[in-house]
Image: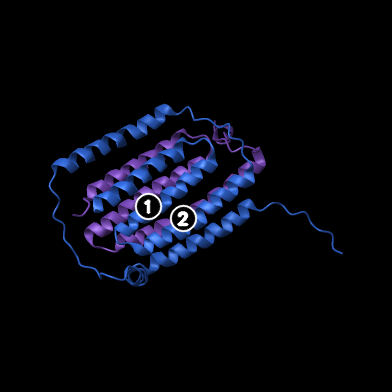
Chain colours: A blue, B purple
Amino acid sequence: MDHLFFGYFAGVIALTALLVVAFKNPIYSALSLLIMFFHVAGLYVTLHAEFLAAVQIIVYAGAILVLYLFVVMLLNLKTDDRYHSQWRAAAFVGGPLLVEFFVLLAGSLSAPPAALPRVDIETGDNTLAIGETLFSTYLFPFEVASLILLVAMIGAIVLAKREVPETPAS
Amino acid sequence: MTIPITYYLVLSAIVFLTGLVGVLIRRNIIAILLSVELMLNATNINFVAFSEHLRDLGGQVFVFFALTVAAAEVAVGLAIIIALHRSKDTINVEQFNLLKW
């Protein structure tokens, strides 16, 4: 049963990831990315990360993708873009990773499962456990994350602001 | 019967590879940013899988931080795209050769 769920989610994730790159129209790419986000959230649920599944849907599918679609609509694109002629660079970088992927796949069939130390965490309330970890061990990175968001917000406003002509004082 | 960690690694490798090739071969800046999102999601899958495998919540917390960085990246990246579109009226990366010499 677990394998069935994993197979479904992994298959859809891999397929939609390919479609994101393959579609010529950015709107279709964004929509297949949306399907991928939902299935990644499903994968998180099978991994007992319920809070992250909710955050994945709310932040990624809800906020980030809407921003993408908004910009695609705003720019009013023509769909005549073709692929880059950078096949050599893509092959040079992608080839070693592909080899690594096959090595990994071959290793998974032969190697015995590694004996790893199992530290028991609180079972049950995933959100509570994440909150406690976030606000105790990772408190400083959490504050830095808020600073990053503030800087990104100010930067986006400054970059996208159009020069407003001076209105004459009435 | 639980899923071996290697399955998640293979899935993550596939998604990361797709995103990497997408960054390299697409000409549309928006498609390039979408491919970057693919790569970030691949790493997030790895983080959550290892978090479950090692029974350590640190991986899930790092997904949270990766999500923050992804949101910031999208905000700034899309603002840059809008500024570029205003100045050059295209978002084809081959038209932008200002730093070429």
Relative height, residue A152 to residue A22 (above, below): below
Crowding near pointer 2: few (<14 within 10 Å), some, many (20+)?
Answer: many
Give the camera-side residue of A19 and A5: A5
Q: What residue is rendered at 38% in x and 41% in y?
A: A15
Left or right of B26? Residue A163 is right
The residue singled out by tag 1 in the image is A40
Task: Say what amino acid the circle numbered 2 marks.
Answer: Tyr
Which mark is drawn over residue A63?
A: none
Q: In which quadrant is the C terminus of chain B drawn?
A: top right
Residue on which disc 2 sits:
A60
Asked whether, in this view, residue A148 is left or right of residue A131, the answer is right
Vertical relation: A170 (above or below) A32: below
**Chain letter for the residue marked with disc 1 in the picture:** A
Labels 2 and 1 positioned on one and the same chain: yes
Q: Percent x, y for residue B77?
A: 53, 48
Picture coordinates of residue A142 (x, y %)? 41, 66
Question: What kind of residue is marked 1?
Answer: Val
User: Splitting the image into 4 quarters, where does residue A154 fall?
Assistant: bottom right
- What x and y, as percent, mark residue A98? 30, 35
